[in-house]
Image (cartoon, rainbow, N blue to C red):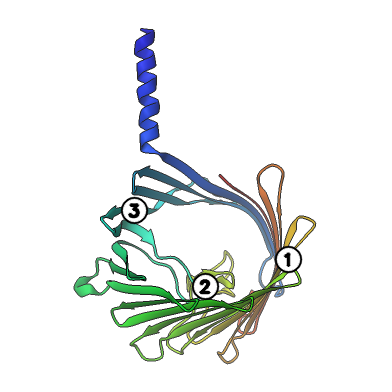
Amino acid sequence: MKKLIATAVAATVSAYAVADISITGSMKANYTVTDYADSRKADTDKFSTEGDLKILGKSGDTTVVMNFGNIDSAEGDTAQTMTAEDTYVKTKIGDVNVQMGNYDSGNNEMRDSSRVNRVKLSTDIAGFGVSYTNGNGGDGANDEVGISTTLGGVKLAYTAKDAADGISASTSIGGVNLKYAADNKDAANSDRSYIELSTELQGVSVKVGKAEAETSTRIGGDSWMGDFEDSTYTNADSSTNAYDLTAGQDVTGIELATSVAGNKLTFRSINIDDVAGDDTDITKVIVTRPLASGATLEVTYTDVTDAAHALTDSETLDIELAVKF
């Protein structure tokens, strides 16, 4: 009997070793107080939580990824849901990398991310990265071809898809990092671009970025300059929001960051302009400190001044406890 139990345990341990499964995730809890400048809009204070879970399984050169999100709750909620966001497999066939399934394309400073079922094939040929993505669109509407390389210390990438193409370049010169990206479309007045410079001066990290949109398109994405990913983004009390951009608006951001006595201090100044009468200024001061408990405390003060929407003018204090595992 003892031998039988030992054999069963050994077989179980061996199965887990072969499967190579890891589980990671994060959770944050926030207390947010907002004071609106206009008395017609009620001040708010609320508690909320947000979590996600990632399951990763490996076997040789093959990896299966499952990401679960929307494990969120706000004050007054009586139930929670969990959504499968990314479910895909990555493997190799000879020298070709294969990624198949539903996964996020990722945010940048110009456009929203997208999550759709797709197949991506990629490989390296003579110093060039080459990729092809099939996004299950009719007549190749969602297909994308990409090529990337490094020339003279400059990282270059180009993507081509139906009625659009993208260009990106980045390098470092004399301690200054430069980044440029463009999202160009065949439709009139629908191009977007982003340029960024960053460096470190006397222990202070400095970053300046500008995202520009032509008159028939809008800046999207969720980046250090703000969460512009959803054009219908609203809060609980208003049909408009400071981050609800319109076509033709440009976004300029400045960030300064340093460390003092174990705290990370970050200052951000964001200006949204280039549409007459619709300028918005957003100022953020963020203090982040890792705690002995393994959690991270982050306190964020935000001041919003919106020329077009008086009800949006506000001051917000957000206290967050976050943990990753």
Query: Mark 1 or 2 closer to N-term?
Result: 2
What amino acid type should be assigned to the residue bearing mark 3?
A: Tyr
- Per the model, the C-alpha gap separating discs 2 and 3 is 27 Å
Crowd band around label 1 with a 10 angstrom C-alpha radius: few (<14), some (14–19), many (20+): some
**Labels 1 and 3 touching (C-beta < 8 A):** no
Crowd band around label 3 with a 10 angstrom C-alpha radius: few (<14), some (14–19), many (20+): some
According to the picture, the residue beneath numbered tag 1 turns out to be 258
Residue at 40 percent across and 86 percent down: it is: 190
Q: Is residue 26 in view?
A: yes
Mark 2 falls on what kind of element?
loop
Residue at 45 percent across and 83 percent down: it is: 192
Q: Is residue 79 in view?
A: no
**Labels 2 and 3 touching (C-beta < 8 A):** no
The nearer-to-camera label among 2 and 3 is 3
According to the picture, the residue beneath numbered tag 3 turns out to be 88
- Per the model, the C-alpha gap separating discs 1 and 2 is 26 Å
Report x, y in % for residue 174: 63, 79
Crowd band around label 2 with a 10 angstrom C-alpha radius: few (<14), some (14–19), many (20+): many
- Dot label at residue 228: 2
Mark 1 falls on what kind of element?
strand
